[in-house]
Amino acid sequence: MGASTEVSVQEGYERWAPSYPDVPGNPLMRAEQELMLQHWPQVAGRRTLDLACGSGRYSRLLREGGAAAVIALDASPGMLRRVAGVGRVCASLSRLPFAAGSFDVIVCGLAVGHEPDIGTWMSEIARVLAPRGTFLYSDFHPDAARAGLIRSFTDGQRRTYTLPHHAHDLGAARAAAGTAGLSITVAQEVRVGIELTEPFEHSESFYRRWHGLPLVLVVRAEKA
């Protein structure tokens, strides 16, 4: 396999869309989803948004949970074509085409690191979130980025691409949430060898080298 090629977020996900799994496709995604589900809000009868939906794994869980409405939003048309059974919207994560207070629950998996300005992103979420609404998101942990781990994927032709990533630590998230009128009530990590323990190829050396390193941050915030 050749060297990794750097691409924009838009190009990367369009290339990845045909082979992107519609269930958690690796041990890290399974550990991320398990932690998200530990803090999953009540969605039955509520208006919900799956922000940066990808192939729709969280949209499916929202629908199965009895949400009154599920909207899946992504900037990638290719990804949206993978999503079925819910409303689909192609738009930017930081410019949401919805009226204020449109949703009772917003979830977002592993996407905020693609946004350069967490303040703008958080303000848009707060704007479209209804009073007493819940926002739950995960992101690749800034400590992992600082350790030199990169966001990359391999497409169906086994070509490897690297995506841009902006590290937003918890302090920045708290400040952005507070400015936007949200209160962070949960902040937990997926750490190597602790929450992430599933074996995979060469996992022994990976766990030995990176033991305790946080790879994913899961945050839950509430609107007053």
Image: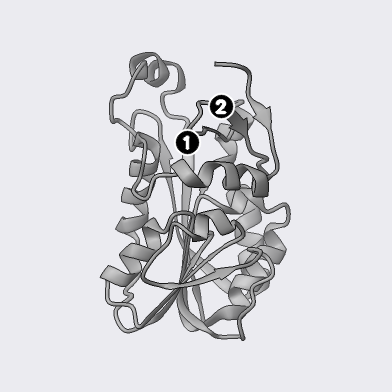
**Which comes before the other along the chain, label 2 or label 1?**
2
Amino acid type at image mark 1 = Pro
Q: Residue 98 in the image: x percent, y percent? A: 61, 81
Image quadrant of residue 5?
top right
Numbered-mark total: 2
Image position of 151 with respect to 3: above or below: below
Q: At which x and y percent is residue 138? A: 48, 52
Q: Nearer the viewer, mark 2 or mark 1?
A: 2
Q: Nearer the viewer, residue 220 or 60?
A: 60
Query: Which residue: 39% across, 13% down?
Result: 205
Seen in the picture, residue 192 relative to 17 is either above or below; the reply is above
* Residue 140 seen in the current view: no
Could one spot residue 219 in this view of the protein? yes
Q: Secondary structure at mark 1?
A: strand
Mark 2 crowdedness (10 Å alpha carbons): few <14, some 14-19, many ≥20? some
Q: Is residue 48 left or right of residue 120?
A: left
Q: Which mark is residue 159?
A: 2
The amino acid type of the residue labelled 2 equals Arg
Q: Residue at x 51, y 29 (%)?
A: 157
Q: Position of residue 25 (x, y in %)?
A: 36, 40
Q: Nearer the viewer, residue 99 or 81?
A: 81
Residue at the disc numbered 1: 214
* In-image side of 165 versus 135 (left or right): right
Marks 2,1: beta carbons within 8 A: no
